[in-house]
Image (cartoon, rainbow, N blue to C red):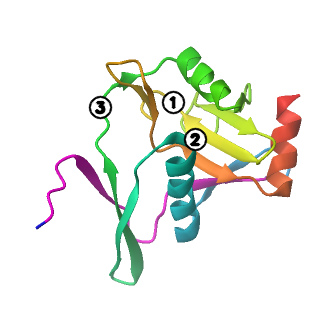
Amino acid sequence: MVDLSPFYLKATYPGRYGFTVTAGPVWPGLAPALPLEYLQRLILGNHHFGDDWRLEAVGREAEDLVIFTTQTTVVGEAADPEEVREFMEKRRLLLLDGMAIGHPGALSFYRDPDQLAAFDAHPANVLKDRDGVILPIDLILVEAGDALAAQLESALG
């Protein structure tokens, strides 16, 4: 048996894979994520923020797909919005001022060169450990397609 104590085991709800962000008629908005979009979001977190999400299994409950992942257990307190902004700016992600997608009041960020966008940055999704290290968890991360990128670039001003 594998010891998972330093890890958090997560299973998606059957047939539900969180959210993604898509271009809207005027402004971007939330949309249900497809399984591949959910997995891409985890890969983006691993690559850009040093997360350690791992795919453990894929199963079925009734007729719906369930995805099982693990993540290193993260302990910390909520980072304040200024700390989140500074953390993102060090990674060249710029604040999309006034664009709260996901949780009410959440911060959103965009990086033009590679069209990386990060949404739903709110206190439960961005922690700070006892050493002051910022730990983003469960952000909605997307590589923006052209239509979404155009809307995000216009929001940058």
Q: Nearer the viewer, mark 3 or mark 1?
A: 3
Residue 84 in the magenta stretch? The answer is: no
Q: How many marks?
A: 3
Looking at the rendered structure, the kind of residue marked 1 is His
Please say if the residues under marks 3 and 1 sit with CB atoms less than 8 Å apart. Answer: no
In three-dimensional space, the C-alpha distance between marks 3 and 1, rounded to whole angstroms, equals: 16 Å
Mark 2, residue position: 102
Q: Report x, y in % for residue 35.
A: 52, 69
Q: Residues within 10 Å of mark 2 (few under 14, many from 20)?
A: many
Q: Nearer the viewer, residue 56 or 11?
A: 56
Q: Nearer the viewer, residue 29 or 36?
A: 36
State which tag comes first along the sequence, 2 or 1: 2
Question: Where 48 sits versus 69, above or below?
Answer: above
Secondary structure of the residue carrying numbered label 3: loop
Residue 8: numbered disc: none
Please say if the residues under marks 2 and 1 sit with CB atoms less than 8 Å apart. Answer: yes
Mark 1, residue position: 122
Q: Report x, y in % for residue 4.
A: 19, 55
The magenta stretch spans which residues?
2-23
Question: Residue at position x 85%, y 56% from top?
Answer: 146
State which tag comes first along the sequence, 2 or 3: 3
Which quadrant would residue 92 be assigned to in this image? Answer: top right
Secondary structure of the residue carrying numbered label 2: loop
Q: Using the rendered image of the protein, determine whether residue 150 is visible from the camera's viewpoint.
A: yes
In three-dimensional space, the C-alpha distance between marks 2 and 1, rounded to whole angstroms, equals: 9 Å
In three-dimensional space, the C-alpha distance between marks 2 and 3, rounded to whole angstroms, equals: 22 Å
Residue 75: numbered disc: 3
Question: Residue at position x 40%, y 54% from top?
Answer: 53
Q: Report x, y in % for residue 67.
A: 39, 68
Q: Residue furthest bottom?
A: 63
Looking at the rendered structure, the kind of residue marked 2 is Gly
